[in-house]
Image (cartoon, grey):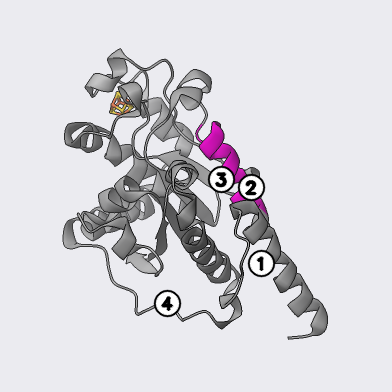
Amino acid sequence: MNRRGLGGQIYGHLRLFSALGVRYAGGAPGEKKAPAAPRASGAAAEAVAHEAAAGDAAGTETLEAIRADLGDCRRCALAATRNRIVFGAGNPHAALMLVGEAPGSAEDAQGIPFVGKAGQLLTRILQAIDLGREDVYICNILKCRPPGNRNPQPEEIAACSGFLRRQIAAVRPRIICALGAFGVQTLLGTTESIGRLRGRVIDYGGIELVATYHPAYLLRNPVEKRKVWDDMRLVRDRLRSP
Ligand code: SF4
């Protein structure tokens, strides 16, 4: 690598550290390689493979068509308490797709994902790996806010997650970054903890998946910022790989 390239890489590292509030960068250059990629569990892998195949056969479904199908959705109880459906936002052909959990109060009010405090932190994290919000596609497992930001319930995930899978098939990202436990557990059909799933590349029906902590969790637990830095560096490196 030439000096200019190395300098740019170091600058990028420092920006990401700054965004995450990490003061000590010791050990970062000597990162470990990600372990061998595990695979999505049977049902989840079959689901995405089936949807990808359906898209191939029928002409890839557009995000607009999926949104139209969602309509004024009343498929689960969250319809009664939401203000706005938060479908997703960003580049419909993005190489990186970010999948969170569910809208919060700011998102529920605006109909746009990740616009509250956690969203602002996510924007800074993306900027630190040289990406803008317009470069990525962002959505959630649930399209409606659970009252009081409680955890999503299994029946709500069951009712809504099919739309997420269709969004993934439509965008066809190169990498999915799952933000928080619910996102990665829903996609992989597992109950394994985010602590065990993060920090590595997982095969999701031919798409690389990297899980990390949700920005809202990061705001409450700043001690985990260093791990998010490691995960986002992995995402950045996979995006830059040939
Ligand atoms: S959370 Fe999903 S399934 Fe439930 S009402 Fe909203 S859009 Fe429909």
Which type of secondary structure does the marked residue at label 4 adopt? loop
Q: Amino acid at mark 1?
A: His
Q: Which residue is mark 2?
A: 124
Q: Which residue is mark 1?
A: 13
Q: Which region of the structure is painted magenta? A: 113-127
- The single residue placed furthest to the bottom in the displayed view is 1
Q: Is residue 114 magenta?
A: yes
Q: Earlier in the sequence, mark 3 or mark 4?
A: 4
**Is the C terminus in the top left, top right, bottom left or bottom right quadrant?**
bottom right
Location of residue 104 (image quadrant): top left
Location of residue 83 (image quadrant): top left
Which image quarter has ligand 1? top left
How far is the residue under mark 2 from the one under mark 1? 13 Å
Residue displayed at 76% across by 71% down:
8
Q: Residues within 10 Å of mark 2 (few under 14, many from 20)?
A: many
Q: Which residue is mark 4?
A: 34
Which type of secondary structure does the marked residue at label 1 adopt? helix
Residue displayed at 34% across by 67% down:
203
Location of residue 122 (image quadrant): top right
- Between 63 and 175, the one lying in front of the other is 175
Q: Earlier in the sequence, mark 4 or mark 2?
A: 4
C-beta proximity under 8 Å, tags 3 and 2: yes
Above or below 138: residue 223: below
Q: Which residue is mark 3?
A: 122
Q: Earlier in the sequence, mark 3 or mark 1?
A: 1
How far is the residue under mark 3 from the one under mark 2? 5 Å
- Between 68 and 129, the one lying in front of the other is 129
